[in-house]
Image (tube, coloured by chain):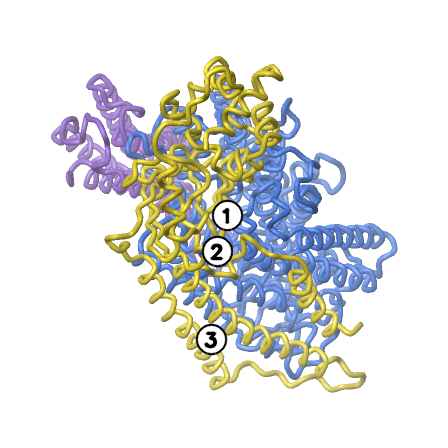
Amino acid sequence: MSGTKGLTSWLTTTDHKRIGLLYFWTAFVFFLIGGLEALIIRAQLARPGNTVVSAETFNQLFTMHGTTMIFLALMPLSAAFFNYIVPLQIGARDVAFPRLNAFSYWAFVLGGLFLNASWLLPNHPVPDAGWFGYANLTSREFSPGPNIDFWLLGLQILGVASLAAGFNFIVTILNLRAPGMKMMRLPVFSWMTLVTSFLIITAFPVVTVALVLLMFDRFFGTHFYLASAGGDPVLWQHLFWIFGHPEVYILILPAMGIISEVLPTFARKPLFGYTVVVYSGVLIGFMGWGVWSHHMFSVGLGPIADSVFSGTTMLIAVPTGVKIFNWLATLWGGQIRATSALHFAVGFIALFTIGGLSGVMHASPPADLQQTDTYFVVAHIHYVLFGGTVFGLFAGMYYWWPKMTGRLLGERLGKLHFWLMFVGMNLAFFPMHFIGLLGMPRRIYTYAPELGVAKLNLVSTVGAFLIGVSILVFLFNAWRTRKRGKVAGNDPWGGATLEWTIPSPPPPHNFDVIPTVASRLPRWSMTQLKAIPEGAELEKPHAPAGSWWPLVAACGLPVLALAPLTHTLWVAFLGAAILITGIYRWAFEPFEV
Amino acid sequence: MPPHRRRRWLTLLPLVLAGCGGPFPQSALHPESDYARSLDALFHGIFWWAVLVFVLVESLLLFILLRYRQRAGAATPKPTHGHTVLEIAWTLAPALILVFIAVPTMRTIFATQQPPAFDALKIEVIGHQWWWEYRYPAAGIVTANELHVPVGRPVALEISTADVIHSFWAPGLGGKRDLIPGHVNHITFTAESIGTFTGQCAEFCGESHANMRLRVAVESDSAFRAWLAGQGGLGRPAATGSVEEKGRDAFRRYGCIACHTVTGVSAGIIGPNLTHVGSRTTIAAGVLPNTAEGLARWIGDPPGVKPGAKMPKLPVAPADLSALVAYLQSLK
Amino acid sequence: MAHAAAAHHTSLGLDSRKMAFWAFIGSECLLFASLISTYLIYKGRSLVGPYPHDILNIPFTSISTFDLLMSSLMMVLALAAVQRGDLKWAKVWLFLTALLGIFFLAGQVYEFTSFVHEGLTLQRNLFGASFFVLTGTHGAHVTVGVIWILTLWSRALRGKLGKANALTVEICGLYWHFVDVVWIVIFTVVYLIQ
C-alpha cells in the first residue's frame, strides 16, 4: 500500500520525511495566504481614510493573518523540520509513532481548511475578533454570526494536531536515540524540539479549556465570560495568555535551534557554550509559564500583580540574551562562509535583538501602558516572529533543502532573497515603533490624517510589498532548483551532525546501519564514530508501511466540528463514528515500524 | 552599499520622516500631565539602555562578520566551547541593567496606582460601542465623547463599560486603561497645560473600533467652570415657529427620542446624551466635525460613516434633515 | 495492536507507548487543572442559587467515589492476571472494572438529573456551568475508559489477551487510575471543601 509513487502513497504515508515535506508545502501555502492578508492590510493602511476593504473585511483580515501565520504557517513550518530532521539527527529510522505522525499532519490540514472555509461561504463569515479573540466581544450577543464558531472549532482541531505531534516528538527524542547519543550530545535543534514539544503538550490543554468554555457560552447558554451572571471576561484573558505566552516560545525556540546548527557549520566552529544554550532553552521553557499577565498590563490587575509579572518578564530576558552572546561567540574566531543560510541566521540575530529590546520596554508596565495595543507592540511581535522565527526558518530551509531534496538552492538568488527581505522587513516594521508612540492603536481599519502617521504607514506598506517580492524570489529559486539546482552529496556544507552522514535525500530507512555516537559533533570527529565491525550484519532495511487510518480518523474531527456549526446533532454522531472507526482500525491493524 | 551603511539608513529614515510632519496630536512622546510624564521618564530611561545594548550587540555582530570572514587557505578555526568568566559577565551585565530598569519600574507602578486625592475631580467614563459616555457626578452632568477637565487639578477617571471591553487612551495625558464589563478601573492624572488632547479606543471592540475616538479639552479653571455650568439644565428650548422647533418635532417623529436624552425633551439612554451637543467640536465620537455638513452626513447615513453603528439609517426628508441639524446645533 | 515499539530497544529502557502515555497524562493534568481552577475562581460568585451547600449530596457521592476506587483495585487485579497469563481471571476482573465504572457513570447521570430537577442547570449560574463542565469532562473520560476496558475484555473473551498484551492492559490501567485520581481531586475540591 505505501509504495513510493502516486497519490495513495502520499495519503497513506507514515514516513517522517514525506510527512515533513507535506507539512512544509502545506504550511508554505498558508504562509503565502497569511502574507496576502498582510499585504491587503498594508494596502488599506497606506493612506488614511482608504477604502481598499470595508471595516468588517479588514477586521477579518487581521484576525486571519495572525491566526494563519501562528497556527497554520509558523508552527507547521517548524513541524516540517521536526519531522524531517530530528529522526536523522538522533540516528533513528522514524519517529516513535509514525501513524500518529500522519494523523497530526492530516488534522492540521483539515483544521486549516475548516478555518479558511469561512472565506468561501456567502458573506464570508470569517473570524473577526482578533487572533486572541477577547471575551466578551466573542459572545453570541456581540458576535452573533458563525465567524467565531469557525475560529473556536478550527483551533480545537488544530490543537489536537499539535498535541499529537508533541507526544510523538517527546517520545522520539527521549527514546529513539542512537547508541551513544546521550542527551548532552543531542544537536541543539533536537533539544529545542524537545522543549517545544513539552510546551505544546502543557500549554494547549489550557487554550482548549478556554475555547471549550467559549463554546459553551456561545452554544449552551453558560456565562463563563459574561459579567451579567457574575462571570468575568478577564478569565478568558488569563486562560488564553497562560497558553499564549508559552505559545510564543513554541514559535521561537525551534528557530533558535536552527540557527544554533547553522552558525557553527558556517563558522566552522562548534557552538560556543552548548550546555548553556541548551539549559537556557529549557529554562526559558519553564520561566515562560510565569509571565503571562504581561499581556494584560492595561487590565488593571493591581500594582502587586503588575510588579510580579514585570519582574518575571525581565528575568526571562536573561537566558534569552545569553543565547545571543553564545551565538556571537560561536562566530568569533571562526571562518565565516557567507552562504544564504548563514545570511538568514545572522539576520535572525540582528533582528531578534531589536525585538528583544522592545520586549524589555514592554516588560515595564507603566511604559507599556503607552505601547500595548498600539503599533509599537505590532513592531515588537514582528521583529521577534518575522525577524526571529521566519528568518530562522528560512535559514533552515537553505540549510536543509539539499538534504531534503538532493539539490542546493541557488546561492545568488538566496542572497537576493535575503537582502530584499531584510530591507523590506525593516522598512515594514521599524516605522511601526514610531507609529505606535505617535498614537495609532492596533487593529484599526483606518486612521485620521491628523495623527501625522500617514507617511510612516506608507513606508511600512512599501516594506511589506518588498517582503512579498523577496518571497517571489525564493519561490522562483525553489522552482528552478528542482531541475537546475546543484546536486548535493551527503554533506554539501561540512555539517557536524548525523543527518549529513547519509545520502541526500535519505533512503526510506535513513541509516543503513544505526551509528554509535561518541561525541556531540559526530561528523567533525569522524575518528570517534565507531566503524562498522568486520562481518557485522547490516540490519535489513524495510520501507515503512503506510496506513489509511490516520487520515480517516483525522477526517472525523472537522465532521465533529460541523455539528455545532450547523446546529445538527446527528453530524456529531457521524463525526464521532468516523473518528472512533479510524482509531479502532488503526489500533488493530498489523503495523511494523 | 556596504551592509552597515544600509542598516544605518534604515534606522534614520523613519526618524527623518517622523520629523517631517507633525504636530502629532496623539503622541505619547509629548507628555502633558504628571501621569504621562512619569511614564515618559521611565520610557526614556529604558530607551537609552536599549540603545546601548543595541549599539553594542549590532556593532559587535558587524565587526565579527567583517573580521572573521572566511579567508582562502585559512586553517580550521580553533574550537572554543566556553569561557566561564566571560559567560558569567554577560549573564550578570544584562541582569544588572534589568535591575536598573526594574527599580524605577516598580516605583512608578505604585506611584501611578495610588488612590486619587480626596479633592480630585471625579468623572465616570462608560464605554459603548462606539462612543464615550462621561458623567460628572458632583455636578450631575452627563455628556459624551468630549471630556473637559481643569488644568492643574487632579482628575480621577472611573472607567467601566456598557457592553464589551474598550480601552481609554489619551496619550498626551497618560497611559491607557481597559474598560471591562463588571470591573471599574481608574486613571488618575493632573493635566499640566491647556489644550486639546485627542485619543481613541485602544482595545478592539468590534466593527467600528477605529471610529471610537475621544477628545480631552484641558481648560483653565474658569473656562472649565463655565463649561460645566453650561452642561447642566434643560436643552435650550426652541422658539415657536422656528426651524429649530421643526427640528425638535422631527427629533420626536423620527424616533430619536428613543435612544437619546435631551433634558426636557427625551430620556433615551442607548445613544449619547445630546442636551448640549451643539457645544461639542466633533460628533460621532470624533469622526465628523460638528458642522451642518457633518451632522447631515451623520444623520443621513450612520452606518455609512461608522460601519456597524447601532443608529439606523432612516429615510429623512431633506427639509426635516436641515431642521434637525439646526435644532441640534442650537443645543449649545 | 502495534508490537513494533515494544520490540525495539529504547534509549531510556521504557516502552515508547508507556512513555507516550505518561506524557499524555501530564497533558491531561493541565486540562483538568484549568477546569478545576475555573471552578475555584468562580466559587462563591454565583448571583443566584442553587448553591453547592444546597444541592451537593456528600453521602451519595462518597459511595460513587468508593465505587471508582474499587474499580481501580479491580483494574490492578486484572493487570496482574494478564501478566501471569491467567485469562479466566483477567476476564473477571476486567468485567468488574468496567461494571463499577458503569455504576459510577449511572450515579453521575442520576446525580445530574436530580440537580437539574432541583433547578441547577448549565445556564442557571456559574456554579452550574463550572460544575457540569468539570464533572462532565471527567465523566466523558470515564466513558472512554469504560469503552477501552470493554474492548480489552472482548478481546479476552476471544482468547486474544495473553501475557504479550500485558502492556496494553497496563496502559489502560494507567489511564483508569489517572481518571480515578482526578475524581479524588474533584470530590475533595468541589464536594468536601465548600
Q: Residue A310, can we see it?
A: yes
Same chain, labels 2 and 1? yes
- Residue tagged 2: B172
Q: Colour of chain A?
A: blue
The yellow chain is: B
* Pick the front one: A254 or B138: B138
Tag 3: amino acid: Pro
Vertical placement of A209 versus A222: above or below? Answer: below
Which of labels 1 and 3 is toward the front? 1
Are dots 1 and 3 on a single chain?
A: yes
Q: Earlier in the sequence, mark 2 or mark 1?
A: 2
Q: Identify the hue of chain C.
A: purple
Quadrant of the rendering where the C terminus of chain C is positioned = top left
Residue drawn where x is 70% and y is 47% of the image = A46
How many marks can you see? Answer: 3
Mark 2 Cα shell of 10 Å, populated few (<14), some (14-19), many (≥20): many
Residue that numbered label 1 is attached to = B199
* Tags 2 and 1 touching, CB below 8 Å: yes
Q: Position of residue A479 (x, y in %)?
A: 82, 50
Task: Answer left or right for C63 relative to B120.
Answer: left
